[in-house]
Amino acid sequence: MDLVLIYTDYYIFTPYVYPATWPEDDALRQIISLLTVTNIGALIIYFLFGTLSYYFIFDHNLVKHPQFLENQVQREIKFSVSSMPWMSIPTVALFFAEVRGYSRLYDNIEDSPYGWFGVIFSILSFLFFTDMCIYWIHRFLHHKLVYKTFHKPHHIWKVPSPFASHAFHPVDGFLQSLPYHIYPFIFPLHKVAYLGLYIFVNIWTVSIHDGDYRVPQFLRQVINGSAHHTDHHLYFDYNYGQYFTLWDKIGGSYKNPSSFEGKGPHDYLRKLKECASNRTSNGYENGTQENGKNK
């Protein structure tokens, strides 16, 4: 995050916001700047990718699903926006530790233990490490002692829209993001790669709530996509993973998505439409028969 802080200091904070006498490396100034940047950045990512997904990917027929709540999108947005500032407080504490040099983030490819191979490997290991950690944190959040207080608010949305992606209780949201932040304190990671991954995981979080259940056939058993995560919202005890199905299969919580079996939300809506059509057709036929009798 210090890359973002360097650029915002250079282009915004130093020339236009803070007094010239306030050093850029002052701890209080860095904390205030990180809080500002983190909250604004989170809102930009949430509204930019949430809006794009909602208008260009999300199937708006899902709004007709019986489990899609009244004014749900507005409620998801309101919940997300009210939670983000609270989530940012412990997040900024970790960003501050990074900025002060306590992490293993590095600036140059030459600083990687294995050059470009090390950078690529660290990106892959980041995905597998965070997927593993989030799986177990997510399962923990479903424990009866903590579920009702911290994780149940996210399960209000049985058929989520992209705007449900960040609609968490602040404790829930921070705990599930914690693996992203602790990774660079344990393993070396290039700063640009870390920034890119931070953006990517937020986009991914939007994507698994977007209602687009299409996945290439050969990846259906590997990637934890929107179809898998929607079933998690609907059936509660399955598909806790973030990117992959690996840990659900190891942990015995994998469920083949209902939408892959012709039993998903879209299929349910199609059946409702067919039933309504049949009732209309039968009503028309009965009415015609009655008219014939009367003649």
Image (cartoon, grey):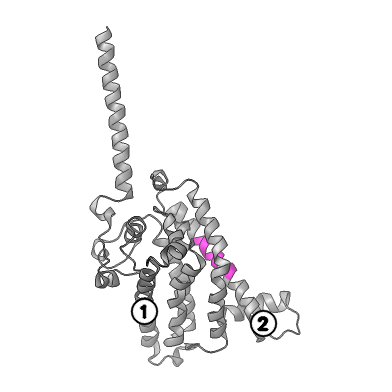
User: Where residue 51 sits: x, y (%)?
Assistant: 50, 56
Q: Nearer the viewer, residue 31 or 54?
A: 31
Tell me if mark 1 has few (under 14), some (14-19) or many (20+) residues whose alpha carbon lies within 10 angstroms of its own: some
Which quadrant is home to the C terminus? top left
Q: Nearer the viewer, residue 24 or 154?
A: 154
Q: 134 left or right of 251?
A: right
Instruction: Tell me what residue is drawn at x 27 percent, y 68 percent.
Output: 222
Instruction: Tell me what residue is drawn at x 52 percent, y 53 percent.
Output: 75
| Amino acid residing under circle 2 | Leu
Find the residue positioned furthest to the front: 145
Q: 50 left or right of 288?
A: right
Q: Are marks 2 and 1 in contact (CB under 8 Å)?
A: no
User: Where residue 258 sits: x, y (%)?
Assistant: 27, 54
Q: Is residue 46 magenta?
A: yes
User: Where residue 179 sits: x, y (%)?
Assistant: 43, 77
Range of magenta residues: 39-49
- In the rendered image, the vertical position of residue 200 relative to residue 109, given as above or below: above
Q: Is residue 161 magenta?
A: no
**Upstream in sequence: badge 2 or badge 1:** 2
- In the rendered image, the vertical position of residue 144 relative to residue 270, given as above or below: below
- In the rendered image, the vertical position of residue 277 relative to residue 16, given as above or below: above
- In the rendered image, the vertical position of residue 275 relative to residue 68, given as above or below: above
| Amino acid residing under circle 1 | Phe
Residue tagged by mark 2? 28
Observer able to see residue 79: yes
Q: How would you classify the magenta stretch by its main secondary structure?
A: helix
Observer able to see residue 1: no
Cα–Cα gap, marks 2 and 1: 32 Å
Residue tagged by mark 1? 129
Q: Nearer the viewer, residue 21 or 80?
A: 80
Q: Secondary structure at mark 2?
A: helix
